[in-house]
């Protein structure tokens, strides 16, 4: 009986679609659903035992359904169907297709042969919005509505259409399922029976007021006024503080600190607000980082591994984060010394520091270092490697202590020519200018001095710039017929022969000892 009724209903629809019936077919009532309003397709069934179908349909026994019999697409009554050329049945277009009459801005085929509205749209042309929604795309809450699904009423509105309450100074029973009735409740209470707390009020007397900001407050009769969670970038018990994390994952929420939980690569500090400064190495990054390097690659050194300038010459270079480009302590090759192992140690001399210093005992019993050298004339000498410091009753030692309080210790004594001629021990003599070039590497710029013969005042010159050494050679009668002697100037690593000068001048002294002469 039910099947015959369905067959008759389908026959009526078929005649109506072909224009062969006087039966009026009206538009369906609008419903808030995804599909456009149209007569539902009957649930037609058939089988091998009973393949009977209404006029215009054929039985697909493999699926047990009656399908429209068609020869071309125009035989299918819906824009969302097409004629299958093999089975001669009307099949649905896939979901999302826009075809023919179903190609409006807010409609598409639903995959079941029907044209359906998209999203929150409804109506025959899908341009109307479902209840609670508004806007061109029906993606906004209509006036008076709120909530993620626009299915709640704003405060002071009630009913399915979220109408405005009209209660004046009285309380309104608002909400989408309420009737908008008016009442007067004690301070802090609301509801038809005044048995609820107003929003953001809490406690049995609804006397407490939530202090939460950017949050969901635990309000109501059983609430404690605390925040249940914080929104967005906020943290703290009242969700009233915004986190300060710049380049990392912020610690937010009720128990958050506002700092970072971790930093993005390349940043460090509690707020991950500082970029690391490590040029060639492994950076110390993260919350507890320093922004500097943990280690350096290759020959780079320094806390930022930014320099690869190595000044170490004859030793093991100091590299890495604690390095300085100089030589490591106690790493100089044998006979070398200095921060960069750049000069000979105290016992050696020569270009390769392979020669061993000798010694000479001065008149005062002090031991002086000496080295051997051959001058330009082929003579081999033993030469003092340091300035003379001898002084006594017959010899006066002058020292520029204003320039260096330990002048004598570092630079030796300054003498007039007469005293300089007395300081050398037996068989040792003041050197001549011709051999001065051989002790360049041991010369320190002591400067020189002069004595005012009228006042006895001593004046010093060129400390830190040059050194002057007396020679035993004299020159008489050149300047106002006063006694004069030759001396040698050493400045900027260069020696120069200088004409004789007054024997009362104050210069340094070194002694030479003749060893042999090349034939």
Image: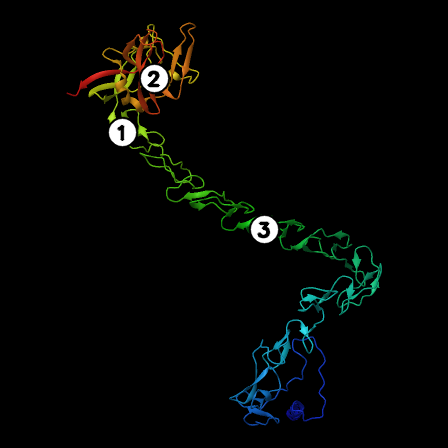
Residue named by callout 3: 251
Give the x, y percent position of residue 26.
72, 85
The answer to whether 516 is drawn above or below residue 117 in the figure is above
* First of labels 2, 3 by sequence position: 3
Distance between mark 1 and mark 2 Cα atoms: 24 Å
Q: Secondary structure at mark 1?
A: loop
Q: Secondary structure at mark 2?
A: strand
Total residue callouts: 3
The answer to whether 453 is drawn above or below residue 34 in the figure is above
* First of labels 3, 1 by sequence position: 3
* First of labels 1, 2 by sequence position: 1
Mark number for residue 351? 1
* Label 3 vs label 1, nearer the camera: 1
Distance between mark 2 and mark 3 Cα atoms: 73 Å
Horizontally, residue 23 falls left or right of residue 292, namely right
Residue named by callout 2: 468
Q: Secondary structure at mark 3?
A: loop
Q: Can residue 400 be seen in this snapshot? A: no
Give the x, y percent position of residue 149.
67, 67
| Mark 2 closeness class: few <14, some 14–19, many ≥20 residues within 10 Å | many
Give the x, y percent position of residue 172.
81, 62
* Label 1 vs label 2, nearer the camera: 2
| Residue at 49 percent of width and 43 percent of height | 291
Image quadrant containing the C terminus: top left
| Residue at 31 percent of width and 32 percent of height | 332
- Quarter-of-image position of residue 35: bottom right
Tell which of 5 and 293 is nearer to you. 293
Mark number for residue 190? none
């Amino acid at each position: 009986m039910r099947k015959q009724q369905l067959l008759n209903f389908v026959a009526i629809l078929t005649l109506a679609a072909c224009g062969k019936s006087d039966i009026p077919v009206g538009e369906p009532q609008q419903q808030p659903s995804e599909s456009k309003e149209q007569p539902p397709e009957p649930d037609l069934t058939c089988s091998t035992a009973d393949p009977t179908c209404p006029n215009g349909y054929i039985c697909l026994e493999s699926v047990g359904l009656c399908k429209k019999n068609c020869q071309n697409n125009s035989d299918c009554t819906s824009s969302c169907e097409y004629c299958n050329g093999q089975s001669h049945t009307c099949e649905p277009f896939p979901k999302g297709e826009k075809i023919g009459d179903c190609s409006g801005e807010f409609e598409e085929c639903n995959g079941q042969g029907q044209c359906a509205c998209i999203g929150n749209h409804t109506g025959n042309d899908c341009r109307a919005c479902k209840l609670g929604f508004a806007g061109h795309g029906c993606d906004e809450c209509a006036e008076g509505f709120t909530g993620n699904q626009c299915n709640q009423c704003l405060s002071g509105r009630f009913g399915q259409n979220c109408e405005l309450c009209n209660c004046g100074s009285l309380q309104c029973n608002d909400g989408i399922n309420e009737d908008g009735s008016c009442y007067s409740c004690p301070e802090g209470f609301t509801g038809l029976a005044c048995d609820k707390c107003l929003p953001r009020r809490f406690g049995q007397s609804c006397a407490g007021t939530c202090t939460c900001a950017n949050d969901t407050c635990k309000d109501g009769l059983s609430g404690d006024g605390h925040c249940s969670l914080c929104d967005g970038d906020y943290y703290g018990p009242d969700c009233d503080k915004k986190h300060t994390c710049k380049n990392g994952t912020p610690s937010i929420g009720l128990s958050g600190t506002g700092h970072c939980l971790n930093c993005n690569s390349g940043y460090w500090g509690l707020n991950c607000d500082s970029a690391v400064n490590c040029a060639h190495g492994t950076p110390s990054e993260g919350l507890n980082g320093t922004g500097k390097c943990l280690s350096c690659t290759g020959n780079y050194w320094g806390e930022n591994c930014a320099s690869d300038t190595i000044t170490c010459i004859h030793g093991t270079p100091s590299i890495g984060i604690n390095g300085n480009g100089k030589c490591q302590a106690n790493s100089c090759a044998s006979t070398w010394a200095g921060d960069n192992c750049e000069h000979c140690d105290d016992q050696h001399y020569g270009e390769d520091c392979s020669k061993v210093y000798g010694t000479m005992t001065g008149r005062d019993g002090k031991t002086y270092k000496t080295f051997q050298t051959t001058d330009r004339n082929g003579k081999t000498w033993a030469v003092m490697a340091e300035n003379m410091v001898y002084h006594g009753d017959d010899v006066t030692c002058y020292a520029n202590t204003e320039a260096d309080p330990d002048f004598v210790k570092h630079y030796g004594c300054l003498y007039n020519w007469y005293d300089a001629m007395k300081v050398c021990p037996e068989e040792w003599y003041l050197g001549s200018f011709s051999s001065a070039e051989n002790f360049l590497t041991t010369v320190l710029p002591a400067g020189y001095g002069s004595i005012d013969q009228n006042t006895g005042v001593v004046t010093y010159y060129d400390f830190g710039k040059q050194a002057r050494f007396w020679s035993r050679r004299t020159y008489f009668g050149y300047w106002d017929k006063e006694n004069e002697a030759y001396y040698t100037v050493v400045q900027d690593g260069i020696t120069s022969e200088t004409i004789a000068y007054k024997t009362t001048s104050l210069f340094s002294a070194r002694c030479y000892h003749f060893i042999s002469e090349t034939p």
